[in-house]
Image (tube, helix red, strand yellow):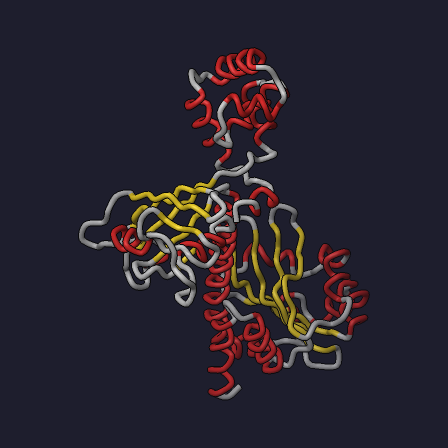
Amino acid sequence: MNDSDIHDTIRGLYEGIVDPQAWQRSLQNLRRASGSTQMGMVVLDKRSNRMSVAELANPVEGLAEAYQQTFQALDPGRPFTPRMPLGGWYIDARELGVDTIARNPFYGDFLHRYGLGSVMACLVDRQPYYEVYFSLQRPLDGPLFAPEDARALDWAIPHIRQAMALRERTSALTALQRLSMQLLDQLAFGVIVFTADARVLLHNGEGEAWVRRLVPNPAAPRTGTGTGGGDEWTLSRPFAAMVRAACDADAPVPAQAAIAQSRQGARAQVVVLPLPPSHALGQAWQQPAALVAIHDARSSSPLLPQVLRDLYGLTPAEMRLATLLTTGIGLPEACEQLQIGRETSRTQLKSVFIKTGTNSQAQLSHLLTQLSATLKAPAAAADRVS
Protein backbone atom coordinates (compact mmCIF):
# COMPACT_ATOMS: atom_id res chain seq x y z
CA MET A 1 0.00 0.00 0.00
CA ASN A 2 1.23 3.49 -0.79
CA ASP A 3 0.86 6.46 1.56
CA SER A 4 -2.38 7.56 -0.09
CA ASP A 5 -3.95 4.11 0.38
CA ILE A 6 -2.79 3.99 4.00
CA HIS A 7 -4.25 7.41 4.76
CA ASP A 8 -7.52 6.49 3.03
CA THR A 9 -7.72 3.27 5.06
CA ILE A 10 -7.07 5.03 8.37
CA ARG A 11 -9.61 7.73 7.54
CA GLY A 12 -12.19 5.08 6.64
CA LEU A 13 -11.67 3.21 9.91
CA TYR A 14 -12.51 6.31 11.94
CA GLU A 15 -15.30 7.41 9.62
CA GLY A 16 -16.59 3.87 10.03
CA ILE A 17 -17.49 4.68 13.63
CA VAL A 18 -20.71 6.14 12.22
CA ASP A 19 -20.53 5.09 8.55
CA PRO A 20 -20.62 1.31 7.89
CA GLN A 21 -19.67 1.82 4.24
CA ALA A 22 -16.46 3.62 5.19
CA TRP A 23 -15.59 0.79 7.59
CA GLN A 24 -16.15 -1.79 4.85
CA ARG A 25 -14.05 0.24 2.42
CA SER A 26 -11.11 0.16 4.82
CA LEU A 27 -11.48 -3.57 5.43
CA GLN A 28 -11.48 -4.14 1.68
CA ASN A 29 -8.29 -2.08 1.34
CA LEU A 30 -6.59 -4.24 3.98
CA ARG A 31 -7.92 -7.42 2.40
CA ARG A 32 -6.50 -6.54 -1.00
CA ALA A 33 -3.19 -5.36 0.45
CA SER A 34 -2.73 -8.69 2.27
CA GLY A 35 -3.61 -10.81 -0.74
CA SER A 36 -6.62 -12.26 1.08
CA THR A 37 -9.82 -13.60 -0.41
CA GLN A 38 -11.85 -12.79 2.69
CA MET A 39 -11.38 -11.00 5.97
CA GLY A 40 -13.46 -10.04 8.95
CA MET A 41 -13.95 -10.01 12.70
CA VAL A 42 -14.25 -13.27 14.64
CA VAL A 43 -15.59 -13.15 18.20
CA LEU A 44 -14.80 -15.69 20.92
CA ASP A 45 -17.58 -15.78 23.52
CA LYS A 46 -15.80 -16.97 26.66
CA ARG A 47 -19.04 -17.86 28.43
CA SER A 48 -20.25 -20.27 25.76
CA ASN A 49 -16.74 -21.04 24.43
CA ARG A 50 -17.98 -20.50 20.89
CA MET A 51 -16.52 -18.56 17.99
CA SER A 52 -18.74 -16.49 15.70
CA VAL A 53 -18.22 -14.23 12.70
CA ALA A 54 -19.23 -10.64 13.43
CA GLU A 55 -18.65 -9.03 10.03
CA LEU A 56 -16.89 -9.85 6.77
CA ALA A 57 -15.28 -8.07 3.85
CA ASN A 58 -15.80 -9.90 0.53
CA PRO A 59 -17.61 -12.81 2.23
CA VAL A 60 -17.42 -16.28 0.72
CA GLU A 61 -20.99 -17.55 0.42
CA GLY A 62 -21.93 -20.09 3.06
CA LEU A 63 -18.57 -20.05 4.85
CA ALA A 64 -19.61 -18.04 7.92
CA GLU A 65 -22.68 -20.22 8.50
CA ALA A 66 -20.70 -23.46 8.19
CA TYR A 67 -17.98 -22.13 10.50
CA GLN A 68 -20.40 -21.05 13.21
CA GLN A 69 -22.55 -24.17 13.06
CA THR A 70 -19.85 -26.86 12.81
CA PHE A 71 -16.25 -25.95 12.20
CA GLN A 72 -15.62 -23.28 14.86
CA ALA A 73 -15.24 -26.14 17.35
CA LEU A 74 -12.57 -27.73 15.11
CA ASP A 75 -10.58 -24.54 14.51
CA PRO A 76 -6.93 -25.47 15.22
CA GLY A 77 -6.16 -21.86 16.15
CA ARG A 78 -8.33 -21.96 19.27
CA PRO A 79 -5.70 -23.52 21.60
CA PHE A 80 -3.41 -20.55 20.85
CA THR A 81 -5.91 -17.84 21.88
CA PRO A 82 -5.35 -17.85 25.69
CA ARG A 83 -1.68 -16.90 25.43
CA MET A 84 -1.97 -14.38 22.59
CA PRO A 85 -1.17 -10.78 23.63
CA LEU A 86 -3.25 -7.86 22.43
CA GLY A 87 -1.98 -6.95 18.99
CA GLY A 88 -0.34 -10.37 18.66
CA TRP A 89 -0.72 -12.50 15.54
CA TYR A 90 -1.71 -16.11 14.96
CA ILE A 91 -0.16 -17.36 11.69
CA ASP A 92 -1.24 -20.89 10.82
CA ALA A 93 1.90 -21.90 8.90
CA ARG A 94 4.08 -20.76 11.81
CA GLU A 95 1.96 -22.12 14.68
CA LEU A 96 0.77 -25.37 13.07
CA GLY A 97 3.34 -26.10 10.39
CA VAL A 98 2.78 -26.97 6.75
CA ASP A 99 2.41 -30.72 7.37
CA THR A 100 -0.30 -30.23 10.01
CA ILE A 101 -2.20 -27.88 7.72
CA ALA A 102 -2.10 -30.50 4.96
CA ARG A 103 -3.58 -33.18 7.25
CA ASN A 104 -5.98 -31.15 9.42
CA PRO A 105 -9.69 -31.73 8.68
CA PHE A 106 -10.43 -28.06 9.40
CA TYR A 107 -8.57 -27.31 6.19
CA GLY A 108 -9.46 -30.38 4.12
CA ASP A 109 -13.14 -30.57 5.06
CA PHE A 110 -13.82 -26.88 5.46
CA LEU A 111 -11.48 -24.18 4.16
CA HIS A 112 -10.43 -26.02 1.01
CA ARG A 113 -14.08 -26.61 0.12
CA TYR A 114 -14.53 -22.84 -0.01
CA GLY A 115 -11.32 -22.20 -1.96
CA LEU A 116 -9.30 -20.98 1.02
CA GLY A 117 -5.88 -22.21 2.10
CA SER A 118 -4.28 -20.14 4.88
CA VAL A 119 -5.39 -18.17 7.95
CA MET A 120 -3.86 -15.29 9.89
CA ALA A 121 -5.53 -13.49 12.80
CA CYS A 122 -4.70 -10.67 15.21
CA LEU A 123 -6.18 -10.22 18.69
CA VAL A 124 -7.62 -6.69 18.63
CA ASP A 125 -9.83 -6.68 21.75
CA ARG A 126 -9.91 -8.70 24.96
CA GLN A 127 -12.73 -8.26 27.47
CA PRO A 128 -13.76 -10.38 30.47
CA TYR A 129 -16.44 -12.20 28.49
CA TYR A 130 -15.28 -12.03 24.88
CA GLU A 131 -12.33 -11.55 22.54
CA VAL A 132 -12.27 -10.13 19.02
CA TYR A 133 -9.89 -11.31 16.29
CA PHE A 134 -9.10 -9.58 13.01
CA SER A 135 -8.98 -12.59 10.69
CA LEU A 136 -7.73 -12.98 7.10
CA GLN A 137 -7.95 -15.96 4.74
CA ARG A 138 -5.89 -16.41 1.59
CA PRO A 139 -6.98 -18.38 -1.49
CA LEU A 140 -6.13 -22.06 -1.80
CA ASP A 141 -3.80 -21.43 -4.73
CA GLY A 142 -2.00 -18.57 -2.94
CA PRO A 143 1.03 -18.60 -0.62
CA LEU A 144 0.64 -19.43 3.06
CA PHE A 145 0.72 -16.49 5.44
CA ALA A 146 4.15 -15.66 6.88
CA PRO A 147 5.38 -13.35 9.69
CA GLU A 148 6.30 -10.65 7.18
CA ASP A 149 2.63 -10.49 6.11
CA ALA A 150 1.66 -9.72 9.70
CA ARG A 151 4.38 -7.08 10.02
CA ALA A 152 3.08 -5.43 6.84
CA LEU A 153 -0.26 -4.86 8.57
CA ASP A 154 1.02 -3.91 12.02
CA TRP A 155 0.53 -0.20 11.28
CA ALA A 156 -3.24 -0.76 10.93
CA ILE A 157 -3.83 -2.65 14.18
CA PRO A 158 -3.73 0.34 16.61
CA HIS A 159 -6.19 2.19 14.37
CA ILE A 160 -8.50 -0.82 14.15
CA ARG A 161 -8.45 -1.20 17.93
CA GLN A 162 -9.09 2.49 18.56
CA ALA A 163 -11.85 2.69 15.95
CA MET A 164 -13.49 -0.44 17.37
CA ALA A 165 -13.43 1.01 20.88
CA LEU A 166 -14.99 4.24 19.62
CA ARG A 167 -17.60 2.30 17.63
CA GLU A 168 -18.55 0.35 20.74
CA ARG A 169 -18.75 3.51 22.82
CA THR A 170 -20.82 5.24 20.16
CA SER A 171 -23.10 2.22 19.90
CA ALA A 172 -23.58 2.23 23.67
CA LEU A 173 -24.40 5.95 23.64
CA THR A 174 -26.83 5.43 20.76
CA ALA A 175 -28.54 2.63 22.67
CA LEU A 176 -28.72 4.83 25.77
CA GLN A 177 -30.17 7.67 23.71
CA ARG A 178 -32.83 5.36 22.28
CA LEU A 179 -33.65 4.07 25.74
CA SER A 180 -33.90 7.65 27.03
CA MET A 181 -36.30 8.56 24.24
CA GLN A 182 -38.37 5.44 24.92
CA LEU A 183 -38.54 6.47 28.57
CA LEU A 184 -39.64 10.00 27.64
CA ASP A 185 -42.19 8.65 25.18
CA GLN A 186 -43.64 6.46 27.92
CA LEU A 187 -44.59 9.56 29.93
CA ALA A 188 -48.29 10.36 29.76
CA PHE A 189 -47.59 14.10 29.52
CA GLY A 190 -45.71 16.29 27.08
CA VAL A 191 -42.04 17.17 27.62
CA ILE A 192 -40.16 19.72 25.51
CA VAL A 193 -36.73 21.35 25.94
CA PHE A 194 -36.38 24.88 24.51
CA THR A 195 -33.47 27.27 24.12
CA ALA A 196 -33.88 30.89 25.18
CA ASP A 197 -34.98 31.83 21.65
CA ALA A 198 -37.66 29.09 21.73
CA ARG A 199 -35.76 26.67 19.52
CA VAL A 200 -36.69 23.05 20.25
CA LEU A 201 -33.84 20.77 21.35
CA LEU A 202 -35.87 17.74 22.35
CA HIS A 203 -39.43 16.55 22.80
CA ASN A 204 -41.25 13.32 23.51
CA GLY A 205 -44.20 11.91 21.60
CA GLU A 206 -46.78 13.62 23.80
CA GLY A 207 -44.95 16.93 23.41
CA GLU A 208 -44.82 16.90 19.61
CA ALA A 209 -48.22 18.51 19.09
CA TRP A 210 -47.45 21.04 21.81
CA VAL A 211 -44.43 22.34 19.90
CA ARG A 212 -46.85 23.69 17.28
CA ARG A 213 -49.21 25.01 19.93
CA LEU A 214 -46.61 26.81 22.03
CA VAL A 215 -44.43 28.11 19.21
CA PRO A 216 -46.67 28.30 16.14
CA ASN A 217 -45.62 29.31 12.68
CA PRO A 218 -44.89 33.07 12.74
CA ALA A 219 -47.14 33.45 9.70
CA ALA A 220 -50.08 32.00 11.62
CA PRO A 221 -52.40 34.46 13.39
CA ARG A 222 -51.79 34.93 17.11
CA THR A 223 -54.75 34.93 19.44
CA GLY A 224 -55.41 35.83 23.07
CA THR A 225 -52.65 36.93 25.40
CA GLY A 226 -50.36 33.97 24.76
CA THR A 227 -48.79 32.47 21.69
CA GLY A 228 -51.88 30.68 20.41
CA GLY A 229 -52.54 30.27 16.75
CA GLY A 230 -51.76 27.26 14.65
CA ASP A 231 -54.31 24.83 16.14
CA GLU A 232 -56.07 27.56 18.17
CA TRP A 233 -54.64 27.32 21.68
CA THR A 234 -54.11 30.36 23.89
CA LEU A 235 -51.96 30.76 26.99
CA SER A 236 -52.68 32.80 30.09
CA ARG A 237 -49.11 34.18 29.94
CA PRO A 238 -46.74 34.90 27.03
CA PHE A 239 -44.86 31.66 26.50
CA ALA A 240 -41.73 33.18 24.92
CA ALA A 241 -41.25 35.41 27.97
CA MET A 242 -41.55 32.41 30.28
CA VAL A 243 -38.87 30.54 28.35
CA ARG A 244 -36.53 33.55 28.37
CA ALA A 245 -37.03 33.94 32.12
CA ALA A 246 -36.21 30.27 32.70
CA CYS A 247 -33.09 30.62 30.54
CA ASP A 248 -31.81 33.78 32.24
CA ALA A 249 -28.17 32.89 32.93
CA ASP A 250 -27.91 35.28 35.89
CA ALA A 251 -31.24 34.73 37.65
CA PRO A 252 -33.38 31.97 36.14
CA VAL A 253 -36.95 31.85 37.44
CA PRO A 254 -37.20 28.54 39.38
CA ALA A 255 -40.71 27.64 38.19
CA GLN A 256 -43.45 29.21 36.08
CA ALA A 257 -46.85 27.99 34.97
CA ALA A 258 -49.64 28.99 32.64
CA ILE A 259 -53.03 27.69 31.57
CA ALA A 260 -53.45 26.71 27.93
CA GLN A 261 -56.95 26.58 26.50
CA SER A 262 -58.20 25.50 23.10
CA ARG A 263 -61.03 27.13 21.19
CA GLN A 264 -63.09 24.00 21.93
CA GLY A 265 -62.62 24.50 25.68
CA ALA A 266 -59.93 21.88 26.39
CA ARG A 267 -57.46 22.98 29.06
CA ALA A 268 -53.89 22.09 29.97
CA GLN A 269 -51.31 23.21 32.50
CA VAL A 270 -47.93 24.33 31.12
CA VAL A 271 -45.03 24.29 33.59
CA VAL A 272 -41.66 25.84 32.68
CA LEU A 273 -38.50 24.94 34.62
CA PRO A 274 -34.87 26.02 34.04
CA LEU A 275 -32.13 23.62 32.98
CA PRO A 276 -28.58 24.72 33.91
CA PRO A 277 -25.92 25.47 31.27
CA SER A 278 -24.31 22.11 32.08
CA HIS A 279 -27.28 20.12 30.75
CA ALA A 280 -26.25 17.45 28.24
CA LEU A 281 -27.74 19.22 25.22
CA GLY A 282 -25.88 22.41 26.12
CA GLN A 283 -22.35 21.08 26.32
CA ALA A 284 -21.40 22.33 22.87
CA TRP A 285 -22.36 25.92 23.61
CA GLN A 286 -22.98 25.98 27.39
CA GLN A 287 -26.28 27.79 27.18
CA PRO A 288 -29.22 27.40 29.55
CA ALA A 289 -32.41 25.74 28.39
CA ALA A 290 -35.99 25.46 29.60
CA LEU A 291 -37.79 22.23 30.40
CA VAL A 292 -41.49 22.50 29.59
CA ALA A 293 -44.00 19.94 30.90
CA ILE A 294 -47.61 19.94 29.71
CA HIS A 295 -50.39 18.21 31.63
CA ASP A 296 -53.75 18.03 29.87
CA ALA A 297 -57.08 16.50 30.82
CA ARG A 298 -57.76 13.19 29.11
CA SER A 299 -59.23 9.77 29.71
CA SER A 300 -57.32 7.61 32.17
CA SER A 301 -54.91 5.02 30.85
CA PRO A 302 -56.33 1.54 30.19
CA LEU A 303 -53.35 0.24 32.18
CA LEU A 304 -54.32 2.05 35.38
CA PRO A 305 -56.93 -0.52 36.56
CA GLN A 306 -54.33 -3.30 36.44
CA VAL A 307 -51.95 -1.19 38.55
CA LEU A 308 -54.69 -0.40 41.07
CA ARG A 309 -55.64 -4.06 41.31
CA ASP A 310 -52.03 -5.13 41.86
CA LEU A 311 -51.21 -2.43 44.40
CA TYR A 312 -54.42 -2.02 46.37
CA GLY A 313 -56.72 -4.90 45.51
CA LEU A 314 -59.49 -2.64 44.21
CA THR A 315 -62.60 -4.34 42.88
CA PRO A 316 -63.70 -3.70 39.26
CA ALA A 317 -66.42 -1.30 40.46
CA GLU A 318 -63.97 0.58 42.68
CA MET A 319 -61.47 0.79 39.83
CA ARG A 320 -64.08 2.23 37.47
CA LEU A 321 -64.96 4.93 39.98
CA ALA A 322 -61.35 5.72 40.88
CA THR A 323 -60.14 5.96 37.28
CA LEU A 324 -63.09 8.14 36.31
CA LEU A 325 -62.24 10.55 39.11
CA THR A 326 -58.72 10.99 37.65
CA THR A 327 -60.25 12.87 34.71
CA GLY A 328 -61.13 15.72 37.07
CA ILE A 329 -64.90 15.29 37.28
CA GLY A 330 -66.76 15.39 40.58
CA LEU A 331 -68.52 12.54 42.34
CA PRO A 332 -72.03 13.50 41.12
CA GLU A 333 -70.89 13.46 37.49
CA ALA A 334 -69.12 10.14 38.07
CA CYS A 335 -72.34 8.64 39.48
CA GLU A 336 -74.22 9.79 36.41
CA GLN A 337 -71.69 8.33 33.99
CA LEU A 338 -71.43 5.04 35.88
CA GLN A 339 -75.20 4.94 36.47
CA ILE A 340 -74.84 4.22 40.17
CA GLY A 341 -76.54 5.76 43.19
CA ARG A 342 -74.96 8.38 45.42
CA GLU A 343 -74.92 6.05 48.41
CA THR A 344 -73.25 3.30 46.37
CA SER A 345 -70.61 5.72 45.13
CA ARG A 346 -69.91 6.95 48.66
CA THR A 347 -69.50 3.36 49.88
CA GLN A 348 -67.15 2.54 47.01
CA LEU A 349 -65.18 5.74 47.48
CA LYS A 350 -64.79 5.10 51.21
CA SER A 351 -63.45 1.62 50.42
CA VAL A 352 -61.04 3.12 47.88
CA PHE A 353 -59.81 5.63 50.49
CA ILE A 354 -59.16 2.83 52.99
CA LYS A 355 -57.38 0.57 50.50
CA THR A 356 -55.22 3.34 49.04
CA GLY A 357 -54.46 5.07 52.34
CA THR A 358 -55.95 8.38 51.20
CA ASN A 359 -58.36 10.61 53.14
CA SER A 360 -59.91 12.78 50.46
CA GLN A 361 -60.77 12.87 46.79
CA ALA A 362 -57.96 15.39 46.28
CA GLN A 363 -55.39 13.00 47.80
CA LEU A 364 -56.78 10.12 45.75
CA SER A 365 -56.63 12.18 42.57
CA HIS A 366 -53.02 13.14 43.34
CA LEU A 367 -52.09 9.49 43.91
CA LEU A 368 -53.73 8.32 40.71
CA THR A 369 -52.10 11.13 38.74
CA GLN A 370 -48.69 10.02 40.00
CA LEU A 371 -49.40 6.40 39.11
CA SER A 372 -50.61 7.42 35.65
CA ALA A 373 -47.52 9.50 34.86
CA THR A 374 -45.83 6.66 32.98
CA LEU A 375 -49.01 4.99 31.72
CA LYS A 376 -49.70 6.55 28.35
CA ALA A 377 -53.31 7.24 27.48
CA PRO A 378 -54.71 5.47 24.40
CA ALA A 379 -54.12 7.26 21.11
CA ALA A 380 -57.83 7.92 20.62
CA ALA A 381 -57.97 9.76 23.94
CA ALA A 382 -54.91 11.79 23.08
CA ASP A 383 -56.46 12.79 19.76
CA ARG A 384 -59.52 14.24 21.50
CA VAL A 385 -57.46 17.05 23.05
CA SER A 386 -55.65 17.97 19.85
Asked which quadrant contains residue 197, the reply is bottom left
Q: Is residue 44 visible?
A: yes
Image location of residue 84, percent across then percent down = 54, 60
Asked which quadrant contains residue 378, the reply is top right
Query: In the visual, does 279 lie left or right of 39?
Result: left
| Front residue (pair 82, 331) | 331
**As drawn, 337 above or below 288:** above
Count of labels in the image: 0
Q: Is residue 310 visible?
A: no
| Front residue (pair 288, 150) | 288
Image location of residue 164, percent across then percent down = 50, 64
Write the residue at 45% across / 57% down. Answer: 212
| Front residue (pair 334, 76) | 334
Image location of residue 323, percent across then percent down = 55, 27
Image location of residue 139, percent across then percent down = 72, 78
Query: In the visual, does 126 lie left or right of 105?
Result: left
Query: In the visual, does 103 lie left or right of 9?
Result: right
**As drawn, 120 above or below 243:** below
| Front residue (pair 334, 150) | 334
Judged from this view, the residue extending furthest toward the left is: 250
Write the residue at 59% across / 15% down. Answer: 341
Asked which quadrant contains residue 219, the reply is bottom left
**As drawn, 53 above or below 262:** below
Write the residue at 75% across / 66% down. Answer: 63
Write the residue at 43% across / 58% down. Answer: 229
